Image: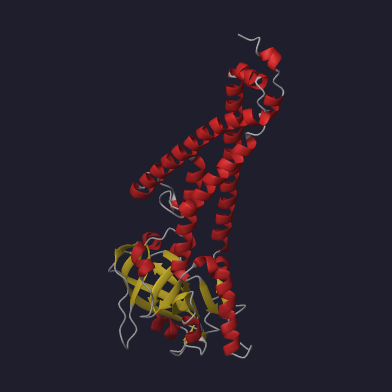
Amino acid sequence: MVMILAIFISDGFKMEIKEKAAGFSGELIINTPGFEMNSNQYPVEREPKYLESIKDHQNVKHVQPFAYRSGLLKNGEIIQGVVLKGIDSSYDWSFFNSVLSDGRVIEFKDSLSSKEILMSTRLAAMLGYKPGDKVEMYFVDKTIRVKLYKLVGLFDAQLEDVDKSLVICDLKEVQRLNYWDENQVSGIEIFLNDYKKIDETAVQVEDLIFKADNNESTVIVTKITDLFPHLFDWLKLLDFNVLVVLVLMLAVAGFNMVSGLLIMLFEKISTIGLFKSLGMRNSDIHKIFLYRAASIVVKGILSGTAIAFILAFVQWKFKLITLDPANYFVKFVPIDFNFYKVAILDLSSFIVIMLILLIPSVFISNVSPEKTLRVK
């Protein structure tokens, strides 16, 4: 039960955090090498010649351009540095719709740039804004420019580094602030069908870019794991903790079964002596007790699996156990059901415990029929 819950919770954390990180920027990003993506000095092409071949890749679900511009938000005496992220009408709003806490998403206009923005509930609370408010933003170049926007929605993704600094706006607005034309952007986000194939897809996308540009490309492919290294390092540490739990629980379960089998052997010591006196081999006697132990192990595995699924389902459905999102990036203990891993774990646990139960065979071989048959 403990092992299965550990796997469900660990996979739940990985699923939630990966979805949030990818929701903000996609699994892969095409951008200028060696420079920060929020720099306005080194744009890339919005529709390069290799873009269609990337869209046709079997693991690519969606591509969308974006542009960054750093700025300052000011409300009264409170000043906060932010990054303005420009997007266009091709943007996939599915992630932001899932984390939208108030208001609505941006509505784009055909010719003019929209003056609407989105920000996080955390950033809005810091500055005292709510949907419908006018927001002043300052941009520093050779001179200081002041722009006025309308806050139309708030999102709550519980990713602190993003929540406290990201503001979503129209791509045309950022292009204008950066003095770019309509074909210049900070990068292109790529969303994948299968996250597990991110490494091989990144290599394949790089090959498509280099082939199209005759190996003289001025862009690179950045993986989400490189963009949010602290999050994915934390997930690796979580995997190690789960491994420790699995090893400890297997060891405890195995040696508890050894002690249980030894108790059964002590209780039936006279029976073992009788079997030996009748000519039964040690291996055959051992099989009798192993069959009995195996039935106990199977019942324990099945009941533990059932209890784990019930508890996990209750948490998945009602979210009873809550967490501090500042530390765990989610508001509740997440659950991700993985039947394949459960089947592998149950089978592996049975095999390991049965192998450990071979230890008591030493006791059976040392039982003397002459001494045990005298015991009444």
Residue drawn at x 61%, y 30% is 258
* Of residues 213 and 168, the one drawn nearer to the viewer in this rendering: 213
* Of residues 193 and 100, the one drawn nearer to the viewer in this rendering: 193
Q: Where is residue 333 in the image (x, y as percent from the top left)?
A: 43, 48
Residue drawn at x 44%, y 37% is 303
Regarding residue 3, the answer to whether it shows in the image is: yes
* Of residues 129 and 322, the one drawn nearer to the viewer in this rendering: 322
* Location of residue 222 (image quadrant): bottom right
Residue drawn at x 58%, y 39% is 250
Q: Where is residue 143 in the image (x, y as percent from the top left)?
A: 48, 83
Q: How are the residues colored? A: secondary structure
Regarding residue 245, the answer to whether it shows in the image is: no
Vertical position of residue 110 compared to residue 159: above or below:
below
Q: Position of residue 133 (x, y in %)?
A: 29, 69
Report the quarter where the C terminus lies: top right
Q: Where is residue 146 in the image (x, y as percent from the top left)?
A: 40, 78
* Of residues 358 and 122, the one drawn nearer to the viewer in this rendering: 358
Q: How many labels does the image show?
A: 0
